[in-house]
Image (cartoon, helix red, strand yellow):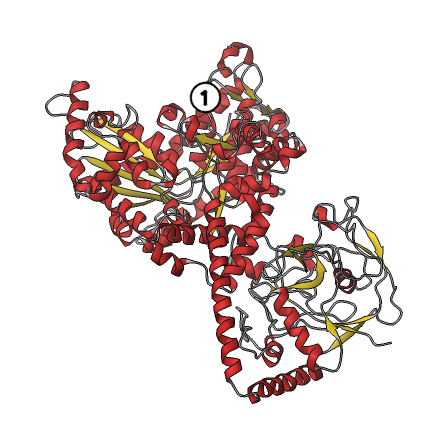
Amino acid sequence: MGVEDALKSHRERNSPEILMYRKTAEPTIGLGDTNAARERLDQKERVDAFLRKWFADPERGNPIAASRSFADATQLEEMLEDHLRALVARRVDGAGRTEAGGAGGNPYRGLQSFELENAAFFFGRSRARNELREALEHRVEAGQAFVLVFGASGSGKSSLVKAGLLADLALPGMIGPVALVRHGALRPSDRGGKPIEALAAAMIGRDEALAELANAYTVESLAALLREAPSHTVPPIRQALREAGRAEALSAAGEARLVIVVDQPEELFTQDRLSQSEREVFVTALEALAKCGLVWVVATMRSDFFDRLERLPALAALSAGEGRYLLLPPDESEIGQIIRRPAREAGLRFETDPVRAQGLDEVILRATSRAMGALPLLSFLLDQLWRRRTPEGMLTFAAYNDLGELEGAIGRRAEEVFRDQPDTARSELVALLRALVTVSGDTATSRSAPLAQFPDGSPGRVLIDAFLDPQARLLVAEGDSGAAQLRLAHEALLTHWPRARDQVAADARDLELRGRLEEEAKRWETASRRDKRGRVLPAGLRLDEGLALCGRWGAALPAAVTAFVTASRRAARRNRRRRIAGIAGAVLALPVVAFFVWASLTVWGVRAVEAEMEFVSIPPPGAAPCFDMGSSPDSQSERAERYDNEGPVHEVCPKAFDLGKFEVTQAEWRRVVIDPIHNPDPAQYKGDRRPVESVSWKDAQWFIFLLNRFGRHHYRLPSEAEWEYAARAGTKTARHWGERADEGCDYENMADLSLKKASPDTVVANCDDHQTVTAPVGSFKPNPWGIYDILGNVAEWVEDCYVANYEESLKDGSAVSTEDCTSRGVRGGSWGSYPRLLRAAFRDGSTPDSRVSNVGFRVARTVTP
């Protein structure tokens, strides 16, 4: 049968099977023989015509015959073996297979890395294994046996080292005369975040490491030696390796080595409680081991932390040149091996779609090849497919679709587990994420937390146990039961589970602040009694941020941080009393004329500002005097975005008032606030026409007091009800321009595509307002009532005492007040707020002393009858 006859038969009767491969390497054509060159070009045109006729499809790809490209003979060999095995598997009668074939162990690891004991199922990285082994061999020959493996998150770095490199090194003679390799692994966060102790424990560790060291050292004593004199560990290591060699009956020519695997050394940078000196001591110990000739060190690091190596020059130098191995994502052929070969070893089969004559493995392969950074998604999907296999060991399309296919599997499974828990457990998700996630710069990363932090039977532990369950495997607990550390199985959970992604985005600034406070708290805690006074948070923005975080997080904040902030507040109060006493004495000593000078300047400033301030009458003529305040869980438009504190919905009929057309600017603030107690230039993002920010509710009240004392009208902050009435401007939608945040970049300064360029992990609206911080007031379109920046730029203080719901609100829109008000209302989103916060109904609260760079205010003016 000719080729064209076979292709025609395949199209008509789906037989015979067709596999077509085309080499992509460019051919070389000699130009010396013109006729030969023309003949080669003619051949190419005939081949292209043949491919267009038989393998091109007007809609999408080639649905009837497998057409593949290859670059070299190695790739063709791997692809052909996979495709022939898949073809045979489809042709063999399923009854001829044993049902036990698919009932063995799970060949897939889900979100966990492959370990040495899983090496039999580790495929698809042959080229990387060889290259990494050669890189290590070169470093050994150079007398500096250290290799840093770096690559994107989820690229399989840990699996490559543990199930690939270690498995190769277990074979005698892979590197020089080495016939025995022992190994230990650690993460810098092990042993309670003490890297040196973690290194000592990994060296002594289990039988796979050098348990022989335990004859002379404990973990603590070895850690002390590594810290003080790491080169002195060489003799005991040599002796322990000799003992290990004798126990394995090595020949005189055979040698033994210890391999130390440092997994995720980026934790050196993300653990804020680690001091710089501790980081440097750890790197010094690694360097001494790598240069001693007896220990090989391999570390795995995410490439998005690579630029931070400059913070540890010794680590940058240790890994320079051939000491760095970049692990690239697997190509299509390697992905095919990752999917199929573990299944083959475990006796599993992929279901075939009889209509399209396409196997599930092929569908998964194509989906994975199209998606960026999809290896963690693939690993999780394959694990879940195995758990839903048929008794005959078949991985099915039904399970694949039910899981949400490749990109939806992690998020859907996490959401299923979450929703199956009682309300009390679900309410603990925020605290759990705060414990297991940290933010450094613009990057959210996993961090470990003691499992004991969540007592047995508590709501938080119920949620954790559900995520730890083998059917989910979304969390991992490592270590002894009394000191087990809890962590995310993989950071892909933070990007592909919308609920977690949104929560981390909402908490991003708090998480980063928590990290900074932990670092400062440790410096304060370890300082001498005499130096502690200089290590506290200074009065002002930094202290206000710390107090606000304590108020928002409560018991979820580490006790050490709470103690540090409390001590800082006590110190600030003492200093303030001293300062006031000094000012009072100075004022009494100054001539009375000083007061009149200040008063005259303030009067001049207030009058100038009062003449320039623009106000909008609320409600404008013809507008409805009443509106429905809040959002309802029954609202189809806001159901997915609303928070519980936005209800219940109730009718409010505010009295007429005037509201500032713009937020109070920095120039206006400086003209009015010229006294020695308040900061005349508090804003972080400078500019006369930019809104003033980093001002507390009390600061705003002082500004208003001066306006009322020296101005011609009565000013105040708007109430919550007045603010929302003006923000809605007679509209019924979530935002004054419509329902979708993505359509609002012409109206408000918010988290958008410009901000995402600066902060890639930020959740943003799919539009571009060309701003990454505050913008000059009035830079965007106003709402229907002519008010600018009401939902963006900076969030705004309101008069009310913040309460959890609207049960105490007044129908006339007056401000809510309580006897002991510890939190004041904040309304609207800001330049950095993710889309969910930019709604008229969104509300928040903060302590009256809080000063942050995304909160300012606008003033209201009482209408005189």
- Please, what secondary structure does the residue beneath circle 1 have? helix
Q: In this view, does 415 lie above or below 678?
A: above
The residue drawn where x is 34% and y is 58% is 530
Q: Which residue is nearer to you in this view: 785 or 119?
A: 785
Task: Say which quarter of the image contains residue 237.
Answer: top left
**Label 1 crowding class (10 Å Cα cut-off): few <14, some 14-19, many 20+?**
some
Q: In this view, does 309 lie above or below 479?
A: below
Residue 241 percent coordinates (x, y): 18, 27
Judging by the rendered image, the residue that carries numbered circle 1 is 344
Q: Which residue is nearer to you in this view: 799 or 105?
A: 799
Name the residue at the left extreme: 252
Residue 160 percent coordinates (x, y): 36, 35
Task: Say which quarter of the image contains residue 93.
Answer: top right
Horizontal placement of 215 versus 595: left or right? left
Horizontal placement of 535 versus 403: left or right? left
Residue 744 percent coordinates (x, y): 69, 61
Q: Report the amino acid beneath label 1.
A: Arg
Horizontal placement of 461 versus 177: left or right? right
Residue 757 percent coordinates (x, y): 52, 59
Task: Say which quarter of the image contains residue 466.
Answer: top right
For residue 255, say whether it is visible.
Answer: no
Q: Which residue is nearer to you in this view: 862 or 114?
A: 862
The residue drawn where x is 39% and y is 41% is 71
